Structure formats: structure tokens, C-alpha cells
Amino acid sequence: MGIKMEKNCPMLYFVTIAVVFISNLQANSDIVYNSTDQSLIDYIAENAEIRYDVISNFVDKRKTFTSKITIKNTGNLTIAYNNWEIYFYAIRLVQPNEYPYKEGFKLHNCKMRLYHVAGSLCKLCPERNFRMESHDFVECKLVMKYWQSAKTDTMPNWYVWAEGLTSRDIESTQGDTLTFVGPFERPEQYQRYADDGWSPFTPESRFKKNDELAVSNVSEKLVIPTPVEMNMKSGSVKVDSSWTVVNSTKYYQVAKLIAEHFGLTIRSTKPQEKFIDITEQHDLNPLNVSTTVNEAYLIQISSQYITVSARAKAGMFYAYQTLKSIHQDGKSLPLCVIKDQPRFAYRGMHLDVGRNFFSKEEILKILETMAMYKLNQFHFHLTEDEGWRLEIPGIPELTEIGSRRCHDLNEDTCILPQLGSGSPKNGLGSGFYTTEDYMEILRYANDRNIQVIPEIDMPGHCRAGIKALEARYRKYMKIGNEVEANKYLLTDFADKTQYLTVQWFSDNAINICLNSTAVFIRHLITSLIEMHQDIQPLNIYHFGGDEVAGAWKESPECKKFLSKKGLNDTATLKRYFAHFMSNLTNDEELHMAVWADALKEGNALYNISAFPTNQNIIAYNWDNLWERGHGDKAYKLANAGYKVVLSHATHLYFDHPYEPNPEERGYYWATRFTDTRKTFGYIPDDIFYNADKSRDGHLLTKDQICPNNECLKLEKPENIIGIQGQVWTETIRTSQQLHEMMFPRMLALAERAWHKSEWEQIPDRGGSWKQIRSGLRFQKL
């Protein structure tokens, strides 16, 4: 194990190297360590008891907060200076006033030096005078950016490593219980700043909140989302084995589903009674709108027969879902007539699998639940700084390296650990979908009337892809194949631009001035088209486009590119890239989709008529922070001619907590919490009506909601095509956590996307919510 016992201190042990030079054998001897062996790494991993505490958010008027890391040596040996390093994760920039600290920031209070590695990954290295005796501890006091009011802002699975040795996750930080994170008991811990209007609910306040919504004497909601009309009659009918389903050649798959659900046979002729008839009816349009007529349906249930009618496959499928909903647990069907049609053609759910990966099987479960509640668009966020999740034929490095996180500082075999993934290869945060996996997902979605919209985020948020292709470059250069090395390269190695994203990356933007970047993007889109073509032809391609943080300013390749294209400066490159993607998607006859901030410079929107070819552009508007003056962005986009999907972070981000409680999971940058009732209460037809409190928890003024007391009018309502819920997965690492964050909020989303309630015209939303809340108790996922 490499242990040396000091002669004058027979009970004192020191973790040492294989070779120890001792200048003298007195009590104050200096011991010099030339290297570290694996036993030291193992010892630290097993015996370093980590504790992380927030000290106070009330420090610097919302700019910074203080925290501390305590490291206790619970073993019987002494840990001293050497080349070992402890890696940890911080989603807030550490020591922001001293950043960048390339030579490390010296933490005098614990005799360690702090380094920012990349993104959320940081490390602590011992100084030469570091020494921690058995059962001793050190405290590293830190200043961090903004605030921390939730336990899950701290990521698990810290690890220890030394050059040439195998890294080990530190046992005291392992797992998702986060027992190494201290409590948030004082206001300066659970509030973000001194004037924060939110505190954890007390038992009394929670009781009062729930008592106002007591569900006694409220009728159960049989169908979620609510149909346009549901005329109930007295009586019911039990569909047993004596019933049959009348075959429909055009809608055989729906007939088969209905027969399987009720345990019936399918026959080609109609009996005199006890049958379920599937008929096509072209005049169905209960809402009298053209955009969703193919999803309309009619169900008529009598004691002798049931008629299911629709004008298209989608409507027939949704009729089947409604039949299932009112026939739960083998109960009789109520005698009724149901007429239905959705308010929006686009009813979406977004899932980020870049930050943390979820298996194909998990995706299929989500698609099944989406279908149950009539959501029809799956926005599949497949790439991020922290992971590339889709196999692309011809570029295996994207998933061989970009889909895996492990400790490899050169990033030749994997990308760096992030967000609590730990150090082992193929551990948390690692994984990808093969082309076969992806096509199976497409088939499953297509069978359930769900369109899959793949997103490959660029030019920012692309670090995983960038690093994978840099590794590819090095691999081919090593064997002298420069042409292949440069074929898909996304990096100008001579670019000295200094930038930092809000996730603390300084190298996550592809260089859009390289010809190899254009080659790469064309290859991506071609590959996606081929994967989709025989299952569900690709209709919408989403290229992200958000949060590009001042890249390319010092890129020699971009300077040459600007001169060649006659462009003014690098600020124009973002717009150039949007136009490039417009041309490319137009060539492939695709609609182009982006996050809304890809379509503006500063506060000025790009003129849609200036896009050279493809003006079929869908903008996903997430930023509606009222106090920043961003509440009317969706209307600005729609009035400018863009098709808009309302994705508002204040109501539709399901990665935010359910309550303003430090024990609740999730980020809280847009709003302190979003419970199911808040999502249910979202009014898509009047976005200003959704403004109530700021993220600080204070009532908003009219001037905050509508600057200069003038609320922007929606001049082109036809351009608001739907709404979408979002799940970002920085704090979500397991299937259970994903389900807890997604449900039941997804059901509230489905209700608002499908059904326009009468209360949307009046202030009181309570009665309808009570019905939905009652119905949620009986819903199956």
C-alpha cells in the first residue's frame, strides 16, 4: 500500500508513494512524495467524507453567494500533498470575480487550489503545505455566482484522480440521495436574496392552499383532455364478449385496437345489435376551424350499438383513446354522445436527452402516454454540450466519443464528466440511440399519430459533437490522412476568441465559417432524412440556434470568410447561419424550426422576408420573463410572419420545481416553481393574462407586463400554431425522477393544448381545476 511509519510517532501513518526520501528521522521530518499509487486514490475515494453547505445567499445583492466544501478524513491514515485531484460539479461559476484563473485560485482556508475545467466540472488540488490527519477535516470556503436555494443544484458523484492512475468516485457523494448536501434551514439559504418573495410552504399554508381546492361534490372528469361536447344520458352499457367490432378496411388498425381493448372479435358484416361500428364522416368540424378537422371525431354510445366516426386516421385514433378513457378498469360505458376536436394542431412535448440519457424503452413509454392524452408532436432534443445521442452513419466518433462521459482530460475516448455523471466510462450520462433504435422510436410514434421532430442543436450547445470530431481529426492525422481528418472538422484551431456561456463552456460553438462544417451539417440532414423516409418522412428539422455566446471574433477562418462574403463583422454570422440553414432545409423541402432567440440580433427580429428561400420557419418562444420586458415576444414573432409554438418557461418548463422548497428537484431561473395547477391555468390565447407574479414572487405591475402601458396586439393569430411542454434534464438522472417531473404536469399541458375552457374568458379558474384535479386521481399513466 506504500505506507511509511514515522519512528518517533509510532501511531501516525502517512499515505505515501512507493519511494519515500527521508532527510532525517526526527519528529519534524520533511517527507517528499515523488508520485502517488492507486492505494491513495482508493483511500481517498473510500475515506473522504464530503459535505457541501450553502452559507448565505444574502451577500452581494443577487450577484454572488457563499458556500463551503468540508472534506473529512475518516480513515486511519494521513492524507498529504501530492498530485491527486478532487473533481466536483458546480452549476454556478465558482469565484466569478477572479475568473479566469488559469493557474488556479488559491483557497487559503483549506490549502487547496481551485480550477474550472469545463462547464460544471471543477477540481481541487492540494497545495504543498496541505496535510489532513486521520479524523481531521478541512473547509474550503467559496464564493459562487448568483444563488443556490435547492439541494439538487449540487450534483453527486464527485471523484478523485491522479496522473496515470484509475479515477474513483468518492463514496460519500455517490447516488441521488444527496446526503452529503447540508440542510437549507435559514432564510439566507432557502431564499435567493433578501427580498425574495418565496419561502417554503408551511403545513398551514399548504393546507389552506389545498383546502380551497377540495374535490368533494365535484364530478369526476372522465376524459382528459376535455372534449368539445360530452352529452351524458341516463344509463350505461357493458361491452362484453357478445359484442363485435365491424371491420373497416381503411381504419383496420383502429378497429384492431378497439377489439383488443374490449376483448372482441372483428367481423365484416354488421349484426343487428351489440356492435361497434367504425365509419368515415367528412362533415365533422365541431369547432368550425380548418387546421384540426382531420383530428375531429364523434362517438355515439347507446345500449344496442356504438358508433365511432371521424374524417381521417388521426381523429379515429383519438376516438379510440377516448373510448379507453371512459372504459377504465372494465367498467360499463356511459350512454353519451361525444363530439371533439383539438384547438391547436401542434400539441408538443420536448425532452432533452443530451444532458442526461434515457433509454429507448423510456422514450417509448413517454410516447405511449403522449398518445393517451392526444399530444401529437415529440420534440426530441438529441444533442447538447454534455452528450451526442444519435448514431450518424459514416461518423462513428459522434457516439463512440460524444455519447460517453468519463475522466479523459484529452477527450480522446469520451467527453468530460458533467452534471454528476461521475468518472467511469459508460456510467451516468452516457448512452446513445443506434439508427435501429431511432427508427423503432419513429415507428412507435407514427403508430400513435405522433410526429418526431429531431433537434441537433447548433451553432452553440454543440461541445459534445465538437470534441468528438476533434478526436476524429487527431486519429486521422496520426495516420497521415489529412483529407479525412478535416472532412467534418468543426473547429478553427487558430481561433483565440474568449467567451463563456451561461453553462460555463468556452468551446461549445461550431465554427460556421469552415467548409467542413457545411459538409457536416448536410451529412446530418441527409442521414436524418434517410432514417425517416420509409417510416415517417421528415417534415420539420430543428437546429436549435439559441444562446450563442460571442463566438468567432478572433477566428482567422471567419475573418477570411467575412471578407469573401462581404459581411461586416462576426455579429452578422449568426444571421448568416440562419439563412444558410434556411437554404439547406429548403433544398430538402423541410420546415425549419428554431428556438426564438436564433431569429434576432439584440432585441431586433430578423425580417422573415429577408430569408433567401425557406420562409416556413417555426419559432419556439421560451423566454417570457415579464420583468425583463420579454412577455410579448411570441406576439412579435407571430406578427412578423413566423409560425410560433408557445413554450413559455414560466408555465411550461417541467424541469422547474413543483414548490418553492429546497428539497424539490429542478432549476428555478424562470420562475421559483411551477405546479400542475399553474400549467393547467395557462391561457394560450391571451399570453398577458398569464402574468401574475415575477420570479421574485412579487406582483407584477402593468408597466412590467406591458411596457408604457401598451400591450402588443396579436395581429396574426393564425401564426400561433400550438403549445409545448419542455423537460430539460440537468437535474434529472433516473427514470423515476423523469416521471416525477413530467407527470402530472403533462396532463395539464394536454388539457390546455386540446381544449379551450369557458373559464379562459373569466378570472375564476377554480371550478374547472377542481374537476381536473379530481380526474387526475383516476388517470393511468
Image (spheres, rainbow, N blue to C red):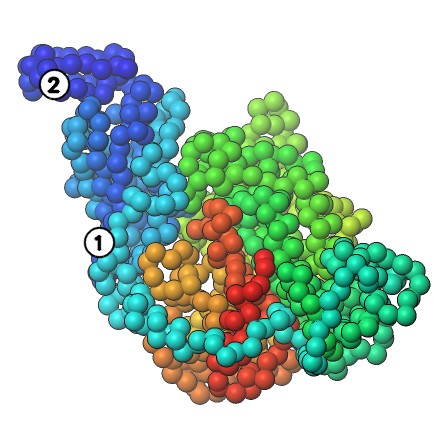
Q: Do the residues labelled 1 and 2 touch (CB within 8 Å)?
A: no
Indicate left or right for 26 with 185 as reference. left
Please name the residue shown 24% across and 68% down the image. 194
Secondary structure found at label 2: loop
Image-quadrant location for residue 750: bottom right
Looking at the picture, how far across and down is residue 731, in whole percent?
Answer: 43, 51
Task: Please name the amino acid that badge 1 sits on.
Answer: Ile
Percent position of residue 372, x then y: 65, 61
Q: Quadrant of the C terminus?
A: bottom right
Name the residue type under label 2: Met
Q: Picture quarter containing residue 105?
A: top left
* Residue at left offset 47%, top offset 72%: 678
| Residue at the image position 10 percent from the left and 15 percent from the top | 10
Residue 150 visible in the picture: yes
Point out which mark residue 764 bears.
none
Where residue 11 is drawn, which disc sits there?
2
| Disc 1 residue crowd, few under 14, some 14–19, many 20+, Cα 10 Å | many
Q: Which of 612 and 623 is in front in this view?
A: 623
For the point 62% across and 83% down, the residue is: 715
Q: Is residue 759 above or below residue 528?
A: below
Residue at the spot of label 1? 55
Q: How crowded is mark 2: few (under 14 residues within 10 Å), some or many (20 or more)?
A: few
